Image (cartoon, coloured by chain):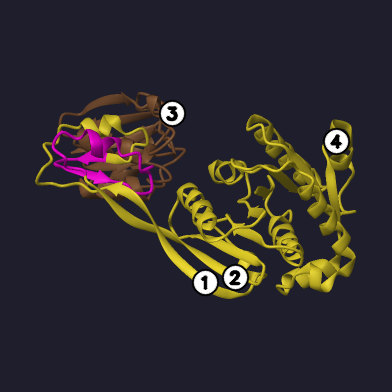
Chain colours: A yellow, B brown
Amino acid sequence: MKKIAIASGKGGTGKTFLSTNLAAWIAQKEAVTLLDLDAEAPNCHLFIKGERKSEAIQYKMIPHWDAQRCTLCGDCLSLCHFNALVKVQQEIMVFPQLCHSCYACSELCLEAALPMKKIPIGRITHIQNRNLAFFESRLNIGEEQAVPLISKTKKYAQNQSRSEITIYDCPPGTACPAVEAVKDAHLVILAAEPTPFGFHDFKLMMHLLNELQKPFAVVINKYGSGDSHLEDFCLERKIPIIAKIPHSRKIAENYARGKLALDTNQELTSEFDQIFHFIRQLKRDEE
Amino acid sequence: MKIAFTTKGTDWDAEIDPRFGRTEYLLLYDDETKTLQSIDNREINQKQHGAGPQTAQKITELDVQLLITGNGPGGNAAMVLEKAGVRILTGYANLSAKDAYQRFLSEK
């Protein structure tokens, strides 16, 4: 099984464009799984339609204060690394958005005054379109932590679907959600834009992936716009550029209409085929 | 009444720190005993999470009734302050604590 993460530093460089089209291209040949892990703003569903197979609400565990049992000793306050507990007068307040569900306060409370209870954080939806199994990770509005939901979505998909290739549409940026999304990937494909801003954020992502010791390749999107700094940099560092998607108004218009480029822009099929073959020749991981 | 100012320094001339949770100091004024006291809050920068509720807890422990600050506390910190019945006045950034207090008196 090969897990391929499509990521970027900058937003709007074409992660979803690449993920959905690549998944649809592979699905023409074999079974494939697509995970929309941009849980704060999932949008693959705009392009991937199919039969709704299942939907599962996801929860996280947080402590609930039991006023009857609590002696207000304050141990929980000093234990919490995330400052999710605050003592106000004769009361302990719990802030679910700050809690990382580590259980320390709950387990170590001598009075058992902080039992863990589950609260909903989001949902996972499984859509099936013939060869293509699509799982969407969607965080509830106002919920701050995407990381636990991203990890649950991966587990959920693994239990429901078997395919040789799994594609992750990752969250933008280089913060915890992006790290969580790429951390078990066998290959990261960076969707990059040949502009100064795109190049800058590409380098941030490159540093992150080097830190995580993740192999990565680049797809230059909107090729022909901006300048040649990104391409020169990749050639110099021998970073593989596995496809170039031209800067084209027609592609953008079709994308804005929610259409897959494979259906509307035949000239791109060779680019997606190149990416597919690059993935294919990766060493198999039998884990 | 005990009044807390979020400040960048330790006396009446200190500028109001517009930030709440990560304010450098808390300046406390008791308008009954006319005493001024400053609390160093800079250790908050060691904390990556939950600065707002932490500073709010500190204020409630100091038995403050009124908070004069800049941008104002976020949602979590506001819940703590509300629970403790602390009145919050925002929009005092860029003033010295002295001028902020004068403005508060004139608008009372």
What's the distance in space between the residues labelled 3 and 1, CA to CA?
Answer: 47 Å
Q: Chain of mark 4?
A: A
Is residue A123 placed above or below A234 in the rendered structure?
below
CB contact under 8 Å: marks 1 and 2: yes
Q: Which residue is located at x 31 percent, y 54 percent?
A: A118
**Which picture quadrant has residue A56?**
bottom left
- Residue range corresponding to the magenta coloring: A86-114
Name the residue that disc number 4 marks: A233
Gap between marks 2 and 3, in whole Å? 48 Å
The quadrant the C terminus of chain A occupies is: top right
What residue is drawn where x is 64% and y is 57%?
A163
The answer to whether one can see residue B59 in this image is no
**Horizontal side of residue A247 vs A154, given as left or right:** right
For marks 4 and 2, give the CA distance.
40 Å
Please tell me whether residue A197 belongs to the stretch shown in magenta.
Answer: no
Identify the secondary structure beneath mark 4.
helix
Instruction: Confirm whether the magenta stretch covers residue A94.
Output: yes
Q: CA distance from mark 1 to mark 2?
A: 7 Å
Judge by depth and name the residue closer to the eye, A282 or B43.
Answer: A282
Amino acid type of the residue tagged 3 in the rendering: Asn
Q: Amino acid at mark 2?
A: Gln
Q: Are marks 3 and 4 in contact (CB under 8 Å)?
A: no
Q: Nearer the viewer, mark 4 or mark 2?
A: 2
Q: Residues within 10 Å of mark 3 (few under 14, many from 20)?
A: few
Which disc is residue B45 wearing?
Answer: 3
Q: Which residue is mark 1?
A: A53
- Please tell me the numbered disc located at residue A128: 2
Earlier in the chain: of badge 4 and badge 2, it is: 2
Q: What is the chain identity of the residue bearing mark 2?
A: A
Amino acid at dot 4: Phe
Q: Secondary structure at mark 3?
A: helix
> How far is disc 1 from disc 4 in space, using C-alphas?
44 Å
